Image: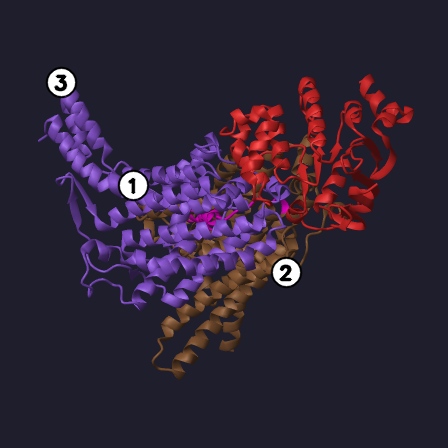
Chain colours: A brown, B purple, C red
Amino acid sequence: MDLVLGWSLYLNSLLIMGGIYALLALGLNVQWGFTGLFNAGIAGFAAVGAYTYAILTTFASDAHLGGWELPIWLGMVAAMVASGLVSLLIGAICIRLRADYLAIATIGIAEIIKLILKNEGKITNGPQGIQAIPRGWEHVAQAEVHGRAPWSWLLGPDGWQGLFDSLPNWWFQPIFMATVLAAVALVYVLLERARLSPWGRVMTAIRENEAAARAAGKNVTRLRLEAFVVGGVIIGLAGAFFAQQIRFLEPTNAFDPTKLTFLVWVMLIAGGSGNNRGAILGGMLVWALWSASEIVIRAGSEAVGGLFPDISVAELATKASFLRMFLIGLMLQVILQRFPSGILPEQRPARAKT
Amino acid sequence: MIDTPITIWASFGEFFVNRYLISGLVLGCIYALGAIGITLTFGILRFANFAHGEVMMLAAYLTFSVMVLFGMTGTQMDLPRLAVAALPLVAAIPAVLLTTGVMLGVDRYFYKPLRTRPTIVVVMASFGMMLMIRALVPIIWGPNQQSFVPGISRAQDYFGGAIKLHDKQVLILIGTVLIVAGFSYFLRYTRTGKAMRAVSDSPELARVTGIDVERVITATWIIGAFCAVAAGVFLAMNTQQLEVTMGFRMLLPMFAAAILGGIGRPVGAIVGGLIIGLAEELIAYPWMEVVGQVFWWLGNAAASPALASWGEAVFEANLGQPLISPGYKAGVAFAIMVFMLIVRPAGLFKGKVF
Amino acid sequence: MSAVLELRGLQGGYGGADILHGIDLSVGADEIVVVIGPNGAGKSTAMKAVLGLLTIRAGAVLLAGQDITGTPPDQVIGKGVSYVPQTGNVFVSLSVEENLEMGAWTRPAGARARIDEMYALFPDLAAKRRQAAGALSGGQRQMVAMAKALMVDPQVLLLDEPTAGLSPKYRGELFQTVRDINASGVPILMVEQNAKQALGVADRGYVLEGGRNRHEGTGADLAADREVARMFLGARADA
């Protein structure tokens, strides 16, 4: 029974992280897949969303700015707005130039964001990070939250406490998972509408023949900027969910570009850039692979370490995880060369119409 | 407490030149050599090569392995001091061959197959290559920081003690001047050098002029690799350490230097590199201290005690305080780059804008 | 008549749909041949087909009787075909002399002497040999472009709208230069918009339309042809 529960919870967290990655891939899809804008700093935009959410919603703390205990939904909206604003700023500077410049600038902004998170200890608590970030649903079990909630009279403080105490400690996990997946579904529906709308068709036209779109009187720069900001907003939302899932934010490891930038690129390219379903599929699939490889690496290193006592298991595991990184890079190359349209190729809105 | 202008200059000169200006120049040389490779690939192959910093890092590790293999650590050798400091440069010679091989191999198998596709796809391939090299190095050499050159470096007096230089700084400065001189000669006076400038000008025209563009591309990689080895080894000599992230940390300053100088302009890359290197070091100088001193001196000269004491107060308040925290060093390059992208994307030397 | 360059029933395009639907052209030794036609007729495309920049589906390109269909550009130029594109035809950041040196890429032997010959042919350029080509006037750039193309002592010279963007005064000078070059023994194939003037210097001319041959004849005959006049010359005069 414990085994079944353990695997169910593993599957649950797999779906949560897969959903978060699906959101990141959807955000990147608006920028790259629809519009051809190269965002090499996804980790930075996600960090802006995550930190904004954390500062606004955590309980009061002396360690960092904020701790305003704002409602979770408000924190998430703010995360989207903050990430969108950073996108607007960086996009306004680079979007009139070719995509290479945007790539350089976004990789730069991600580094700068990391620097700020590290150095501005008063706001972010620096490298020590922000702890105990409230997670959707789980936080209502806390006395401070259900005591103040508009529905607190229903059971009274002790009644609520008793109810939450009686629940298994994972009670909120499936609900949180459902929330993340609902957000993925919502974003998907909205993006599909956008893609099939005149706006989406103009985006495709710009990507494929900018000169013609310009000649047709479209404000190309503005439209591209819109797409870049929309993508940034979605990435900010993913960042807010990410903060909830990992519950502890610090500038370096949590926002490792390998996992939050490269991996998302591989997901989108593998799934099929330009196709929203492809982005979701890529996000879920590549995350499942990545996560499963973690188990393989751990078990494999232990097995090898058991056979050869001279070899350090920890070192072996570290090298194996670098090997995984190498393989992800190689996978990107293979996909680019051999399967450029991914698993689910882009479907042109024009064709869907006729 | 405050001295006469002459001693102010003496202390300023001593402190400023030896602690800040020289290290800024040395850093600038390293950036300049790295930026040459970036600007050449951007100008001739028309894409932003994100893997360039990692190639520098790889080159430093390869040099280190050559040194270890031939016991060139210096301590057990009976050689003059400067010659011991120059040992890494000897070891760099075989590393140049290896790195050139790596660069040509990468081009052949990862960039060349994508040459008929939009260049941004090649940018993505270089993005993946960045990940692959950064994963491969810790698999071979281990993930931890390593000492590149053992021992503590001591500064030597030059010009009667007015200037203090470390041996490594002397080698880096002279080495950069020699490489830049050789490179300029190559571009100006050799057939292949002129063809490189021609392809950078217009690849289409170069093709219909009958110039062997593939040969020019090969030459570009060889020169880029040579400069990358020099930059990587100089960097490792300067910090005396090897780190997996050392190349990535160089990426932003190098792109900033290339953009500041103008894409496709090697002279621009060198000037840009020097400016970025100097700026990164000089922002940490206690400039407000100097401002205070100047006002104190002006106040005394104008017989205005109020001004003098205000100057003194500024001096006292900012004693030893860097103008901008050195933690934001990397931000300087980014700020300069963003400024150039807004004001003059063609850079100081009228480079290309894509 | 022994043709230096011949296009036989050429069909092809840039990978996608065909642009040329069967073009026949030939340039004889010592000839100036002019190709005219409305926009989109495939004039420049036909030239690019010779250079190997096109995907050719049917037909052949012959250089001095040798089949060079589909040969890549650097080899075509090595065989003695020189090409001056309509725009972007000089390396702007290279000096005039360096441009000429680049022109001799496929035939570096004797380049020094050729450069001096070019300065004799275009005396204006001799004084500007150290200047960046990008700093020259439009007319002088066109001279650099032609001199650069002549560096390989070509078997045939292809000029894509050499007078585009030039003032009428320069236009006349340029056609005179084209004659001089031809008189020195270089056959020329030229695409032109200024049909009347171009046909004036041409030995023969072709009219293309919709990727097909429409008319051909001597320069003088075409200039006098009523239909050609109505199609191009007249339309131009009315405008």
Q: Residue A56 in the image: x percent, y percent? A: 42, 45
Residue at which label 3 appears: B301
The label on residue A208 is none
What amino acid type should be assigned to the residue bearing mark 1?
Leu
Q: What residue is drawn where x is 31% and y is 38%?
A: B278
Q: Is A21 on the left or on the right of C3, as rendered?
A: left
Q: Nearer the viewer, mark 3 or mark 1?
A: 1
Residue B286 drawn above or below residue C125 = below
Q: Residue B276 in the image: x percent, y percent? A: 36, 39
Q: Chain of mark 2?
A: A
Quarter of the image holding residue C152?
Answer: top right
| Label 1: how many Cα within 10 Å (few below 14, some 14–19, many 20+) | many
| Label 3: how many Cα within 10 Å (few below 14, some 14–19, many 20+) | few
In magenta, the rendered stretch is A34-55
The label on residue A338 is 2
Q: Nearer the viewer, mark 2 or mark 1?
A: 1
In reply to whether residue B81 is colored magenta, the answer given is no
Residue C223 drawn above or below residue A100 = above
Residue nearer the viewer, B71 or B153: B71
Q: Is C78 on the left or on the right of B264, as rendered?
A: right
